[in-house]
Amino acid sequence: MNPVRLIARLDIKGENLIKGIQLEGLRVIGNPQEYATGYYNDGIDELIFMDTVASLYGRNNLARIVEYTSENIFVPLTVGGGIRSLADVEEMLRAGADKVAINTAAINNPKLISEVAKTFGAQCMVLSIEAKARGKGEWEVYTDNGRERSGKSVVQWAKQVAEMGAGEILLTSVDCEGTRRGFDVALVKAVTDAVSVPVIASGGMGKVQHLVEVVQQGKASAVAMADILHYRRAALPDIRTEADKAGIKIRMPEREN
């Protein structure tokens, strides 16, 4: 099994890093570039920038933040929010992104998934799924930052997008997001059992044990962290050490701080 990747997720509104609970009640945290630099220096494996209001306003405003980050930070960078076309993808890649995460536009136009994968490579095409529980063992896909129902089953949609060329799935539990009570392990396992592409678990990490559970039981390939890092509830070096003690194979940063 490949080492588990530790990913810092930074939700952006305008120029600010923000954090909410269940994708609502957004609170300003600070300057996203400062936080991203700190996580890079602490040895983060990857970064995810998500424009939380892009779907509402029809465009992604992250290009400038991405340009700055890519010039100073040298880990894979995924950008999502409001990406609707190949031209939008190209703009983000030119700004310095390595991958794009697409949710709403893929629901509205599933062909976009295969178009992005064919044009830029499957490794570039991250399918973002925002999931809400709708009964035992059932989850529904939501769009527009967890606001709109799609009527689609998360597991069936995950299978479809993997077949269409998505190289990775960013799976966010809206129910758990920001709660610090742990990931929806059953959700993650349902998706990892259904697809062969890597799945990033997102939403709910409040302590290292939550990472251990979602990797060992949910079979997540990567873990996206926000609240636990932004509020310094745990430092990255300590997270690595504790995960390693629990038997989780973690990537070790090769760069010097």
Image: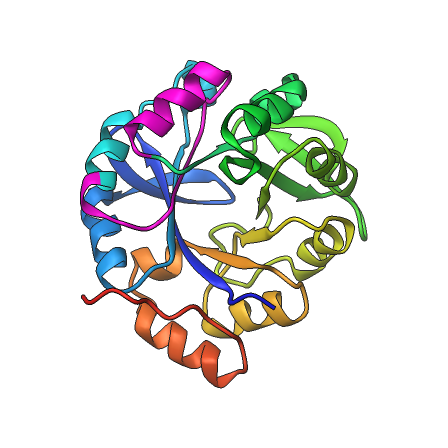
Q: Nearer the viewer, residue 120 or 133?
A: 120
Identified at 41% across, 31% down, the residue is 52
- Decide if residue 93 is on the left or right side of residue 122: left
Quadrant containing the C terminus is bottom left
Q: Which residues are magenta?
A: 71-96
Task: Give residue 78's position: percent from left, percent from top.
Answer: 41, 40
Identified at 52% across, 83% down, the residue is 246
Identified at 27% across, 49% down, the residue is 74
- Decide if residue 220 is on the left or right side of residue 41: right
Q: How many marks?
A: 0
Identified at 21% across, 43% down, the residue is 33
Task: Give residue 87's position: percent from left, percent from top.
Answer: 43, 15
Quadrant containing the N terminus is bottom right
Task: Give residue 135's position: percent from left, percent from top.
Answer: 80, 47
- Decide if residue 154 is on the left or right side of residue 102: right
Which quadrant holds residue 48? top left
Q: Nearer the viewer, residue 140 or 85?
A: 85
- Decide if residue 173 is on the left or right side of residue 120: right
149 is within the stretch colored magenta: no
Task: Give residue 247's position: percent from left, percent from top.
Answer: 54, 82
Residue positioned most to the bottom: 245
Which quadrant holds residue 215? bottom right
**Colour approach in the figure:** rainbow
